[in-house]
Image (cartoon, coloured by chain):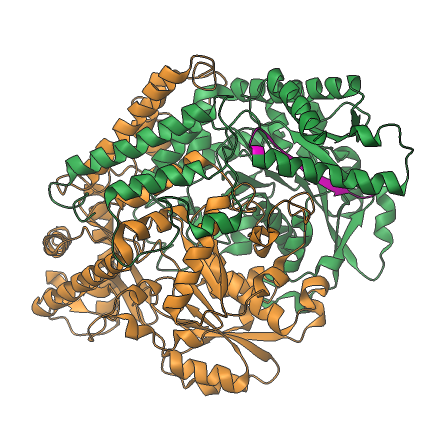
Chain colours: A green, B orange
Amino acid sequence: FSNLLPAPGGEELTRGFLQEVVDILLGYISKSSQRSSKVLDFHHPHQLKEGLECFSLDLPDQPETLEQILVDCRDTLKYGVRTGHPRFLNQLSSGLDVVGVAGEWLTSTANTNMFTYEVSPVFVLMEECLLKKMQSILGWSDDVGDGIFCPGGTISNLYSILVARYHFYPEVKTRGMGVLPQLALFTSEQSHYSVKKSAAVLGMGSENVFMVKCDERPASVLSHQALVPFYVNATAGTTVYGAFDPLNAIADICQRYTLWMHVDAAWGGGLLMSDRHKMKLQGIERACSVTWNPHKMMGVPLQCSAILVKKRGLLQECNDFGAEYLFQTDKNYDVSYDTGDKSIQCGRHVDVFKLWLMWKAKGSEGFGSQVNKCLENAEYLYDQLQRRTDFELVLKNKPEHSNVCFWYIPPSLRGQPPGPDRDARLHQVAPRIKGRMMEKGSVMIGYQPLGDKVNFFRCVFSNPATQQEDIDFLLDEITRLGDI
Amino acid sequence: FSNLLPAPGGEELTRGFLQEVVDILLGYISKSSQRSSKVLDFHHPHQLKEGLECFSLDLPDQPETLEQILVDCRDTLKYGVRTGHPRFLNQLSSGLDVVGVAGEWLTSTANTNMFTYEVSPVFVLMEECLLKKMQSILGWSDDVGDGIFCPGGTISNLYSILVARYHFYPEVKTRGMGVLPQLALFTSEQSHYSVKKSAAVLGMGSENVFMVKCDERPASVLSHQALVPFYVNATAGTTVYGAFDPLNAIADICQRYTLWMHVDAAWGGGLLMSDRHKMKLQGIERACSVTWNPHKMMGVPLQCSAILVKKRGLLQECNDFGAEYLFQTDKNYDVSYDTGDKSIQCGRHVDVFKLWLMWKAKGSEGFGSQVNKCLENAEYLYDQLQRRTDFELVLKNKPEHSNVCFWYIPPSLRGQPPGPDRDARLHQVAPRIKGRMMEKGSVMIGYQPLGDKVNFFRCVFSNPATQQEDIDFLLDEITRLGDI
């Protein structure tokens, strides 16, 4: 490796080596899009740790050869999971957008940091441009709006609570929670666990997050007299069901009681790109802050998540500490572009370029078509499930997002009356089938229990490569694996 | 783009397009290692925003052509900063390791998430393997040690405060800071601003972070009677001077008063790879937690930062919320490998593969040589500065790390007596030269004031591509630009 660049004369070897890596990656990309490829080649942790053929995880004292490095690359991909496969339906993030991948390759080659314009002139401006576009899609007027890209939706939601707290109690920054009243946060029972997790991190206590039942009248939550309510999280696209909270009704409450309204649209935000589906987020323009993850429904490679904050300047005030070694005020350019002090991070990965490049390549309309395609897939699956007697839908209504939740009813349970006995047996069906699925590697789909409902499958579509034939295959495969 | 994969027959177009992107990137890499290339092609924000030739930041409704996407890629690199250039000495992270870049290209192609073994079998095990190795290098025994890779050193430092607080006051997770005494944190005046920033985020208040003067006896800091001290941050490699706190002396205090000892070795951790320099971190084995950023002194592409925690299980207990849709306990494999609930994030980018691959390619010894090389560069610069009358060292002692801090004294100030007038004029020298440097694009180096010292240059070496000739060039170039 001492012969690769920057070694003198390392040019040819470097090009040759990187080209071989690229050939491996191109082969992987093309194979991942073929239905004849497995989604994964499953091994248990102990099997991978013991080492397989030429593949060892151990870190050596002495260098390995370049040939071995290439073998390591091949094996890493071989034993991984093809999240870009059209039959990977396991996660809200899936697919492998070719332009997005190109964007990420360039990002890692540019290898820079978002903290200052000085070292990221182009990427800082791209971030500004993307945030403005997203704000205008939310329906915010030009004279409001701020935001930042950050490492995932949970951190975006954490930002929302952080800035809300600072907005009402700016003294918290210097003096801490000790000088504040006991604060209460509200979110729906089916919201993402990040609201509780973030409240714990921020020193607010997870038990001060009140989980509102989905059928509860929102006003009744305000009767917790000992605490001071200040923050409401509404979800646009819940993780399991893909459900949308009634944003306008929540906004009315927030307005009446002067509460911060956050909308977690990590998953549902993508629907704003579709003329057909954006009305599901009506009222989002009234939110004080919004989480929106382009790495989910818009198919952008991981990670790409934005927190959008309506009140301009709040992120900066809440988080800045003006480190002079980084944010010098006597630079030769307009230092308002040194946006790093808005962040709770110091160094910050460039997450914007791949999204910017995909936007150039698809246009807003292309994102809209992708979203429509994924929701059509969900409707198709919903229709198929209604027709089949070996499956049962968890929710009877047409899906609002691309989540479809269902049970597979194996022959032994069909016709058995509902009750604890049937529930106990049904609870074991999805994990057993999922295990077989992974070992066979033919398809991947998630499952979980929720509330009083025993383990059920959740299928989600965010990869536009998935076709109706994959959905047919999924149901047939579940039947095959379930009847073993 | 509808003709790229996954479109039927998109194979050839996809390969062709990605190959063209790769050719652009290979050209960039090779040019970045040439001293005849500029480090940057500076433009002011308004110039880039107005658009330059074919380059426009605007996001379209309709797709652009693939040809235009390639132009966009070229232009993005053209107007950026070559952080891999041997004369980019501006940041603690620099250089462009070819194997690291290959690792990052593969990571983005695999496009997966660290939260579960299910979707990241290989990467989860690589993380475990790297953490164990790093713990053993710290000198921790096999039966202790835990950790996680996270988005940057500031978040790693935030974790250290978070787990320390939970360790002493586990009720904070559910009940919040309101039920705790007023806590105090201690750190040195010259430590990174992330300690204060994190204390603010965590609801502890930045004014409860006490900045200990570097010549103050550590024991005297414990006299703040109204507050309960619980956490001490020691720095191994400060940001500006590269100084090392006396870890054993601090550990003695922490042991005596039962305080959490964190070592921020984000910058200095790399020296542990060098037999020649690791003694500067003596006592680090006594820390309760350590931040170590391989993306700094070890030359790993951004981002790659680890928080290491001695007490096993603490990260999990502190952060877990057991979301059932993700961390099902009835999976077909050992779910202790689903490490995602240790994190304050939900989705988490794969930051480990590039480090793992570089470790394979260099071995521990290769990292050691790289570190030695960078510190030799610092000594060479120090020697040169001592010999020249147009420069003045900020610290008279030989640098402990690769930071070298100095003033350029322009002819008009030479011989002028020390005092406020000279200081005021000297304060303007570095920013003025830095501005000219950026406009010319020949070299990049940082500057800042610190304490009672007016603006001075800070040169840091973390790119092993930098040679003595670059250091000579730097000093000559400063002289040239300073005398205009």
Taking the magenta stretch, the answer to whether it contains residue B344 is no
Q: Is residue B230 toward the left or the right of residue B65 in the image?
A: right
Q: Position of residue B94 (x, y in %)?
A: 28, 50
Taking the magenta stretch, the answer to whether it contains residue A442 is yes
Q: Is residue A142 visible?
A: no
Q: Is residue A107 above or below residue A388?
A: below
**Residue range highlighted in magenta:** A440-452
Q: Is residue A259 visible?
A: yes
Q: Is residue B393 toward the left or the right of residue B184 in the image?
A: left
Q: Is residue A425 above or below residue B174?
A: above
Q: How many marks?
A: 0
Q: Position of residue B256 (x, y in %)?
A: 51, 87
| Residue B264: quadrant of the picture | bottom left
Residue lying at the far front of the rendered structure = A484
Which is nearer the eye, B211 or A267? A267
The image quadrant where one finds the N terminus of chain B is top left
Q: Is residue A275 above or below residue B443?
A: above
Residue at 29% across / 47% down in the picture? A332
| Residue A329: quadrant of the picture | bottom left
Q: Is residue B478 toward the left or the right of residue A81 in the image?
A: left
Which is nearer the eye, B292 or A346? B292
Q: Position of residue B422 (x, y in %)?
A: 21, 68
